[in-house]
Image (spheres, helix red, strand yellow):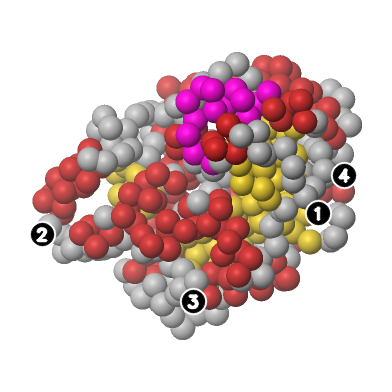
Amino acid sequence: MKQDFTPIILGSDINVYGMARSFNEAYGISVKALADTQLAPTRYSKIVDVELHHGFSEDPTFIEVMREQMQLYQDHQEPVILIACGDGYAELLSKHKEELQQTFVVPYIDYDLLEKLISKEGFYQIAEEHGLPYPKTKIITKADFKNADYLDFPFDYPVELKPEDPVSWLDVQFEGRKKAFTIHDEEELQDIVGKIYNNGYQADLILQDFIPGDDSNMRVLNAYVGKDHRLKMLCLGHPLLEDPTPQAIGNYMAILPEFNEKLYEQVEAFLEDLNYTGMANFDLKYDERDGEFKFFEINLRQGRSSFYVTLNGYNLAKWYIDDYVYDTLKDKPTVYGNKLKSKQVLWLGVPVKIFKQYAYDNKAKQIAEELIHEGRYGTTVFYDKDHGFKRWLLMRYMFHNYYARYKEYYQVNKGQFFGKKN
């Protein structure tokens, strides 16, 4: 097949590998990635060539490197498409969109909209305006902490506590640090908020009503909105297991594809009202108290576990190419994914044995186990066309590490809240 486009992916994580694999499956090509550091999922790969630039994940290095890339590709005849695989890279592409568009295709929203949506506070404000349900929320500022003015809120314990600014959160370290906290009483809340602000965190915190239920009450939704700002694809996933490791809590480890017409209608209206463009990823949870799905956040790119979309027949790479290279999406009907259960495939980010041992026992798990029995499951990183010995060994090691992580962290960070013993 003649290659009449060039993708450049930003990052080196599992999301990057999923996008590189999507391009390889659809077009038989390998791709170039630009990144700050080399992460395991793309190491020793034949389908993605990671070019490292120290400091690339932030300005000024980012735009300096991209200007060098603009020189390299300025005479390129075919479209060169930039695809971000992390919040920081999506933000940087949006920030420099006007300049980068002189050479590249940059399928991302304008920076003024990104600034509103990338902030959880901004997202909840926009969700409120557009009638998108979200958990009851209180914003805690550093001033609130100093004045002890954060202990009164209009919902009960337990509560969820998470940083508003996940980028600066990476620099904050203390014993017991997690990606997010589930807190059961006032004494624990005072202790955690104190540790956070006394160890250098400056931004706001998000305090939310804890929506009851185990990991299988979560949902993840990936969408693609075309350059004409019309929705082209929605693919809903039903997470059945999450990573219990403190720094990775909330990362999905098993996703069963699902169809939900009401959710699709809500998200379609929301994105089109915003004049959105490109990939979007939503995290939400079913609230049995009122029967509604509550939206936690929007990621302005495909999610880290989004290869479940490709696995179920909606190849992530093809949306970009059909839209910006072949211009074939404008006349096609919107794809509402996973209507046919007979074609559904389970995505796993852990060994089958861990899924069977730790996923909460319910009907969805039974369906997933049937798919496993039928061989209808897959992963992002184990790919038959990229199967060198060093890579295979590293991926096996990466998967094997989850045994120790679940043994150490599942009961304290997950099992105790859901009544599950392992």
Mark positioned earlier in the residue sequence (1 or 2): 2
Mark 1 lies on residue = 287
Amino acid tagged 1: Asp
Mark positioned earlier in the residue sequence (1 or 4): 1
Distance of label 3 from label 2 (alpha carbons): 31 Å
Q: Which residue is found at the position 49% from the left and 58% from the top? A: 117
Mark 3 lies on residue = 230
Q: Which mark is residue 2?
A: none
Mark 2 lies on residue = 75
Q: Label 4 neighbourhood size at 10 Å, few (<14), some (14-19), many (20+)?
A: few
Distance of label 3 from label 1 (alpha carbons): 29 Å
**Is 71 situated above or below 247?**
below
Viewer-proximal residue, 313 or 299? 299
**Is 187 situated above or below 182?**
above
Q: Which residue is found at the position 60% from the left and 58% from the top? A: 124
Q: Are marks 1 and 2 in contact (CB under 8 Å)?
A: no
Mark 4 lies on residue = 362
Amino acid tagged 2: Asp
Amino acid tagged 4: Asn
Find numbered disc 2 in the image and state the secondary structure of the residue it sits on.
loop
Find numbered disc 1 in the image and state the secondary structure of the residue it sits on.
strand
Distance of label 1 from label 4 (alpha carbons): 17 Å
Q: Is residue 342 left or right of residue 95?
A: right
Find numbered disc 4 in the image and state the secondary structure of the residue it sits on.
loop
Q: Label 3 neighbourhood size at 10 Å, few (<14), some (14-19), many (20+)?
A: many
Mark positioned earlier in the residue sequence (3 or 4): 3
Q: Are marks 3 and 4 in contact (CB under 8 Å)?
A: no
Q: Which residue is found at the position 34% from the left and 69% from the top? A: 324
Amino acid tagged 3: Arg
* Camera-nearest label, 3 or 2: 3
Distance of label 1 from label 2 (alpha carbons): 53 Å
Viewer-proximal residue, 180 or 89? 180
